[in-house]
Image (spheres, helix red, strand yellow):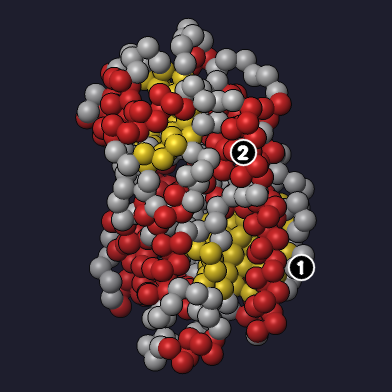
């Protein structure tokens, strides 16, 4: 097992909601030293952040304006974890694909690679594993001369389904996968998509030799196109506190004594079925619909969801602050739209919910969510979703709680890290 991991992520350490990358990096830091590289700020990000008074930007501003790395040690994370924010990059996503974009992308990539190189030397990282979590715009892989033992690209979403990331992301992500020693994908459908994008005839794990035999289109510099399913997990010990500790009722529920139907996660415009949430609030007027997470969509205001008296928007919470909210929810939701994006999702929150023993009502948005049908309430329509909530609110008995927690216990980050080291060993045996 390596002693050092460099983890580059789209999600910064102070991301407003729990992220796969930070949870995984924290789990890694229990046994190895981790250098966590935050997604860089562009010059445009800096100007926008100054204008709105972004506190996360403010604490990093001096280093950004002087084009220096900013290093951070976080109190809530083990001692062998250090985060670095690189100097600012140029805002270039608006450029069309072509030579001009490629020229400036190489400049940006050089900024991030230099920042990683400086951090690696500063903290004496060597013979390390490099993981890029869903940020192919910078450092999609590292060259061997930087001291990397293995480069891994971690694909967690269908990058083509967001207009901003799709503009250049699909091409850069495929290039990163081709040059990495291993591609980890978080869902069954992502495995199909990446296999197809790389010119493989089957989404199974393939060696370099198999790739050479099956595709003449891959670049001659390809190191590997091995694709491995690596499902999301949960910080089970955090969420099981819901079952072992007693928390005060959150301030948002102080004057509400009715049952609570809850959701925890990013309230974005690509995944969440807001008309469904409105139907829930109207169907259960005597119950509270508690939505915990950052609001990143105008739709709730457009359809009047925010005007309903029994709907509470609690805003963002740190991971450590979620158990008190979750403890006072009588059932929890995954109200995802059924679309191309969500078909490739294995949601982080499913195992968090189950670790807390909560009854989960979900739409059938992907093949992977359907594997939880035995321990959740899976609905195929809005009307069935409402019916499932009614059942879930009456079926929170000890036997069902035990089934849910057992499922979560098999999907811990510790189990995933064990899988990761097995894959790294396979890479080293093949190289």
**Residue 152 showing in the rendered view:** yes
- For numbered disc 2, what is the local secondary structure? helix
Residue placed at 39% from the left, 91% from the top?
216
Residue 334 is situated, as x and y percent measured from the top left of the image, at 42, 38
Disc ID at residue 203: none
Residue placed at 53% from the left, 40% from the top?
375
Q: Are marks 1 and 2 in contact (CB under 8 Å)?
A: no
Taking the image as shown, residue 148 lies to the left or right of residue 251, namely right
Residue 32 is situated, as x and y percent measured from the top left of the image, at 76, 59
Disc ID at residue 1: 1
Other-residue count near label 2 (Cα within 10 Å), few / some / many at <14 / 14–19 / ≥20: some
Tell me the residue that label 2 is attached to.
403
Q: Is residue 91 above or below residue 114?
A: above
Residue 112 is situated, as x and y percent measured from the top left of the image, at 53, 65
The disc, 1 or 2, on the residue closer to the chain's N-terminal end is: 1
* The one of 414 and 145 positioned closer to us in this rendering: 414
**Residue 44 showing in the rendered view:** no
**The image quarter in which residue 231 lies:** bottom right
């Amino acid at each position: 097992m390596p002693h050092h991991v460099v983890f580059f992520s789209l999600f910064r350490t102070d991301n407003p909601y729990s992220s796969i990358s930070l949870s995984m990096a924290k789990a890694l830091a229990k046994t190895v030293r981790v250098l966590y590289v935050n997604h860089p700020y562009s010059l445009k990000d800096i100007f926008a952040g100054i204008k709105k008074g972004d506190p996360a930007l403010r604490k990093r501003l001096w280093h950004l304006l002087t084009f220096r790395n900013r290093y951070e040690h976080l109190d809530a994370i083990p001692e062998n974890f250090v985060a670095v924010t690189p100097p600012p990059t140029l805002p270039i996503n608006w450029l069309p694909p072509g030579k001009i974009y490629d020229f400036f992308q190489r400049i940006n990539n050089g900024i991030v690679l230099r920042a990683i190189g400086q951090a690696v030397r500063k903290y004496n990282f060597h013979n390390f594993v490099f993981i890029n979590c869903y940020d192919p715009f910078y450092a999609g892989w590292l060259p061997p001369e930087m001291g990397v033992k293995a480069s891994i690209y971690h694909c967690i979403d269908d990058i083509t389904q967001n207009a901003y990331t799709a503009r250049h992301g699909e091409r850069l992500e495929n290039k990163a996968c081709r040059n990495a020693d291993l591609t980890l994908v978080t869902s069954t459908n992502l495995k199909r998509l990446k296999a197809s994008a790389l010119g493989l005839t089957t989404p199974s794990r393939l060696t370099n030799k198999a790739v050479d035999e099956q595709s003449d289109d891959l670049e001659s510099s390809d190191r590997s196109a091995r694709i491995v399913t690596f499902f999301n997990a949960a910080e089970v010990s955090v969420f099981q506190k819901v079952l072992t500790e007693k928390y005060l009722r959150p301030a948002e529920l102080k004057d509400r004594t009715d049952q609570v139907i809850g959701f925890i996660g990013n309230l974005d415009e690509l995944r969440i079925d807001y008309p469904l949430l409105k139907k829930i609030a109207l169907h259960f007027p005597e119950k509270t619909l508690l939505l915990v997470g950052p609001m990143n969509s105008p739709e709730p205001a457009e359809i009047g969801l925010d005007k309903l008296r029994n709907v509470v928007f609690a805003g963002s919470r740190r991971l450590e602050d979620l158990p008190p909210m979750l403890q006072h929810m009588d059932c929890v939701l995954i109200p995802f739209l059924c679309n191309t994006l969500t078909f490739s999702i294995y949601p982080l929150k499913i195992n968090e919910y189950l670790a807390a023993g909560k009854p989960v009502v979900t739409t059938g948005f992907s093949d992977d969510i359907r594997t939880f049908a035995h321990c959740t309430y899976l609905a195929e329509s809005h009307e069935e979703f409402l019916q499932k909530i009614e059942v879930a609110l009456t079926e929170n008995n000890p036997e069902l709680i035990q089934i849910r927690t057992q499922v979560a216990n098999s999907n811990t980050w510790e189990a995933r890290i064990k899988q990761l080291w097995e894959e790294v060993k396979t890479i080293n045996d093949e190289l």
